[in-house]
């Protein structure tokens, strides 16, 4: 038969017309008996090996079909050239070169199923949760809700449904966290009537009954005192099985037992067996307390900053004392406060050594990582009457190990310049005890005096640190001062220069209950300074300087603190004019009574000392302060903070007096407002103030810029 679409074959090789098919022969090609005889014999043994294949590989000649013999013979005959019809002519379009690709439009077709991504409309939806308000969980649900985080927008309705299913599981978890283990939650998404493009997602919660503790069981070894674990696990029968309550109680055990001699306590996995009939759960907590322990010795490893001899200065416990994790933390904080570590860790290590009281000795392993010992610090400020003042200090905190610091300082200002060299050893033989030695040369040029001063001083102090603020601190030492200063001479009504030598033994005690060294918000401070001194200027005259100061801080709210200060000072045993002007008391300035110039409060030179101008007038602003033997000051501030900024209205009062005891009369009052910018090292302070009852010659406005609060 011809294939569809093909022309009939012509020529001598064309097939002959088919003859009638012969009648089918039903005789088998191979008789059954012959076929059965050709099969190999089969063994009845299932474990027998397989029979070998026959070795005769001769391929029988293919049978010849008499009906197809002529066709096969014809196919094997050679083809006579020229017997096929000639090839058709070539299409000229096929011979043309292809068009360049750049001539085609390569932009893909856009279909309804493939819109531009930027034009996809958002599905708007509203979300709501019901049933959690009575449990107080609505706010927490909203803060974690996938629907709420979506902001009411989604790409399609499927996404809204997925978020609703997430919130369904969230509602279940929140209810279980409060003990509602039978609670159910169902989320539905429906179209809002009248607005087909907007959906409403509703999560409905049904809490069911709240499970409560039916029993509380602790599985732990015997402790000393007995039942210590149970006592520190604040759970009782009848308490709701709330996740936060359970976890908090277990955390209390992990915190409190290391403070009472069990540093290696481990809590096992809790088990809570619920009873649906009674609505109660049986709580069981396995606890491995580890051995009851006492402090041993210190060990160290890592890059050592301190050797064991200096490390032994820091602990506040004795060997053999019952272990307390708070003392271990205190040791680590004390090492951090030195500022010499990049990292430091302290952890208990078992020794297996049993002490006489039955406790196991536990050594503390101190891992040290050395940090930079050198630092550069500085500050800059401005006060009316004091001018601009900048200070810089270079410190090598471990120049003379251990903790022997070399400190180089410089002061550069419009009215003060100076250089200093200091040596300081912290934790000198005792924790938090500092021994320092300072040599300085300074020039001060103020209205009150012009002085060239050299000082050699030493000091021993017990100090607070930024990490460990102490309630009680003290300091004592010595000062050797040589100073050449301008002094007003009442005989000549002019100033001349005198040289003074001063030997002083200053001391200070401070009681501090405030909550911060640089920016206190609550508590109070009481400070007393006492300095027996000897003035040598032609004659040797002993005297004593005293100063007492109290400050208090009261938080009205989280953002508002009321701060107050009172200070009084006195110099007894010497006349004012026999004291070097730089060691007298002066009032006024950023750390005193704001609104008045630096050191401007107190006795002034006589008006007769002024030289009249051509019109016979004198300017009282040219009168220079003389200083006094006593002083009193008062201040009140309202510190309002919002974020990193603050506003501080304030009022100050005070004065300096020629008498040895301060008076309550003739107080000078200043008021103003300040701004604060709070940083991690303390607040930046800018205060503007004005005197409320100025004297003739006092300025109208005073400006103060510095770091730290006024007090």
Image (cartoon, rainbow, N blue to C red):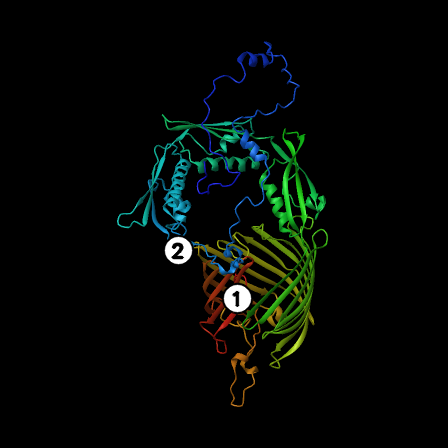
Q: Is residue 173 above or below residue 570?
A: above
Q: Quadrant of the N terminus?
A: top left
Q: Is residue 213 above or below residue 495?
A: above
Give the number of the mark in front: 2 or 1.
Answer: 2
Give 186 or 455, whichever is nearer the viewer.
186
The image quadrant that residue 119 belongs to is bottom left
The image quadrant that residue 562 belongs to is bottom left
Q: Residue at x 66, y 77 (%)?
A: 497
Residue 579 visible at all: no
Tag 1 secondary structure: loop
Q: Closer to the N terminus: mark 2 or mark 1?
A: 2
Q: Residue at x 36, y 37 (%)?
A: 185
Q: How many angstroms separate mark 2 from mark 1 (CA)?
A: 68 Å
Location of mark 1 (residue): 592
Q: Residue at x 59, y 59 (%)?
A: 529
Location of mark 2 (residue): 119
Image location (x, y in percent) of residue 94: 52, 55
Image location (x, y in percent) of residue 629: 57, 68
């Amino acid at each position: 038969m011809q294939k569809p679409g093909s022309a009939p074959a012509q020529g001598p090789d064309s097939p002959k017309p088919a003859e009638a098919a012969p009648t089918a022969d039903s005789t088998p090609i191979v008789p059954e008996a012959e076929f059965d005889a050709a099969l190999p014999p089969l063994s009845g043994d299932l474990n027998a090996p397989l029979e070998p294949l026959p070795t005769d590989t001769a391929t029988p000649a293919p049978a010849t079909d008499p009906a197809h013999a002529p066709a096969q013979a014809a196919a094997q005959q050679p083809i006579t050239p020229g017997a096929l019809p000639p090839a058709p002519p070539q299409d000229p379009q096929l011979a043309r070169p292809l068009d360049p690709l750049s001539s085609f439009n390569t932009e893909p077709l856009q279909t309804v199923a493939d819109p531009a991504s930027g034009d996809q409309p958002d599905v708007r939806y509203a979300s709501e949760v019901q049933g959690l308000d009575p449990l107080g969980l609505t706010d927490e649900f909203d803060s974690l809700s996938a629907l709420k985080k979506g902001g009411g927008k989604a790409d399609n309705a499927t996404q809204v449904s997925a978020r609703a299913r997430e919130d369904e599981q969230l509602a279940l978890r929140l209810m279980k966290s409060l003990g509602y283990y039978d609670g159910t939650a169902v989320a539905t998404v429906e179209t809002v009537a009248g607005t087909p493009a907007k959906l409403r997602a509703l999560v409905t919660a049904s809490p069911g009954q709240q499970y409560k503790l039916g029993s509380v069981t602790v599985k732990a070894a015997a402790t000393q005192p007995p039942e210590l674990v149970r006592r520190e696990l604040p759970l009782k029968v009848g308490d709701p099985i709330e996740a936060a309550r359970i976890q908090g109680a277990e955390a209390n055990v992990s915190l409190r037992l290391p403070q009472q001699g069990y540093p290696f306590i481990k809590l096992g996995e809790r088990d809570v067996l619920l009873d649906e009939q009674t609505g109660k759960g049986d709580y069981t907590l396995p606890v491995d307390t580890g051995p009851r322990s006492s402090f041993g010795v210190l060990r160290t490893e890592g890059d050592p900053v301190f050797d064991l001899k200096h490390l032994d200065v820091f602990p506040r416990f004795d060997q053999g004392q019952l272990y307390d994790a708070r003392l271990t933390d205190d040791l680590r904080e004390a090492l951090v406060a030195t500022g010499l570590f990049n990292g430091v860790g302290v952890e208990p290590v078992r020794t297996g050594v049993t002490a006489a009281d039955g406790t196991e000795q536990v050594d503390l392993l101190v891992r040290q990582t050395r940090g930079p010992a050198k630092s550069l610090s500085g500050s800059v400020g401005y006060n009316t009457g004091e001018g601009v003042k900048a200070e810089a200090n270079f410190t090598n905190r471990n120049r003379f190990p251990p903790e022997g610091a070399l400190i180089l300082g410089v002061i550069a200002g419009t009215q003060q310049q100076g250089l200093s060299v200091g040596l300081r050893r912290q934790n000198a033989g005792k924790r938090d005890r500092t021994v320092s030695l300072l040599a300085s040369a300074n020039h001060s040029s103020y209205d009150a005096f012009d002085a060239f001063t050299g000082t050699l001083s030493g000091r021993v102090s017990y100090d607070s640190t930024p990490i460990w603020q102490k309630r009680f601190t003290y300091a004592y030492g010595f000062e050797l001062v040589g100073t050449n200063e301008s002094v007003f001479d009442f005989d000549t009504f002019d100033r001349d220069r005198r040289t003074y030598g001063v030997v002083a033994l200053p001391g200070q005690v401070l009681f501090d209950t405030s909550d911060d060294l640089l920016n206190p918000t609550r508590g109070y401070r009481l400070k007393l300074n006492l300095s027996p001194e000897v003035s040598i200027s032609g004659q040797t005259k002993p005297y004593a300087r005293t100063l007492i100061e109290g400050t208090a801080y009261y938080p009205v709210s989280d953002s508002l603190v009321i701060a107050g200060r009172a200070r009084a000072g006195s110099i007894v045993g010497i006349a004012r004019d026999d004291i070097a002007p730089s060691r007298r008391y002066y009032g006024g300035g950023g750390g005193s009574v704001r609104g008045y110039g630096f050191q401007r409060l107190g006795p002034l030179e006589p008006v007769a000392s002024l030289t009249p101008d051509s019109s016979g007038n004198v300017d009282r602003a040219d009168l220079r302060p003389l200083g006094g033997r006593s002083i009193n000051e008062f201040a009140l501030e309202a510190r309002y903070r919002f974020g990193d900024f603050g506003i501080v209205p304030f009022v100050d009062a005070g004065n300096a007096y020629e008498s040895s005891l301060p008076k309550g009369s003739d107080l000078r009052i200043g008021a103003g407002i300040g701004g604060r910018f709070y940083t991690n090292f303390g607040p930046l302070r800018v205060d503007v103030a004005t005197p409320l009852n100025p004297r003739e010659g006092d300025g109208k406005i005073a400006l103060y810029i510095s770091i730290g609060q006024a007090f």
